[in-house]
Image (tube, rainbow, N blue to C red):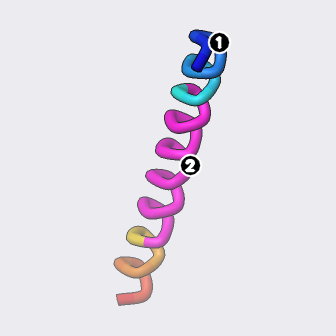
Amino acid sequence: MSPEMRESRAALILLAASVGAVLIFGAFTLLTQLG
């Protein structure tokens, strides 16, 4: 695997992790607001 591929892959994983964290945080906030 070339270094460029690894770099873009790391960026993709970081992006997915941040999006997932925001989604989980949003769902948690919504649940606490409803509860």
Position of residue 2 relative to residue 18, above or below, is above
Residue 33 percent coordinates (x, y) = 41, 79
Per the rendering, the mark at residue 18 is none
Q: Who comes first in sequence, dot 2 or dot 1?
A: 1
The single residue placed furthest to the front in the displayed view is 1
Position of residue 30 relative to residue 2, above or below, is below
Please tell me how crowded label 2 is: few (under 14), some (14-19), or many (20+) other residues with Cα within 10 Å. few
Circle 1 residue = 4
Determine the residue positioned at 47% across, 75% down: 30
20 vs 31, left or right, is: right
- Per the rendered image, the range of residues in magenta is 11-27
Circle 2 residue = 19
Residue 23 percent coordinates (x, y) = 52, 61
Q: Mark 2 vs mark 1: give the one in front.
A: 1
Please tell me how crowded label 1 is: few (under 14), some (14-19), or many (20+) other residues with Cα within 10 Å. few
Position of residue 29 relative to residue 10, above or below, is below
Q: Main secondary structure of the magenta part?
A: helix
The residues tagged by marks 2 and 1 sit, at their Cα atoms, a distance apart of 23 Å
Badge 2 marks a residue whose secondary structure is helix
Determine the residue positioned at 57% across, 10% down: 3
Residue 22 percent coordinates (x, y) = 50, 53
Determine the residue positioned at 58% across, 27% down: 11
The single residue placed furthest to the bottom in the displayed view is 35
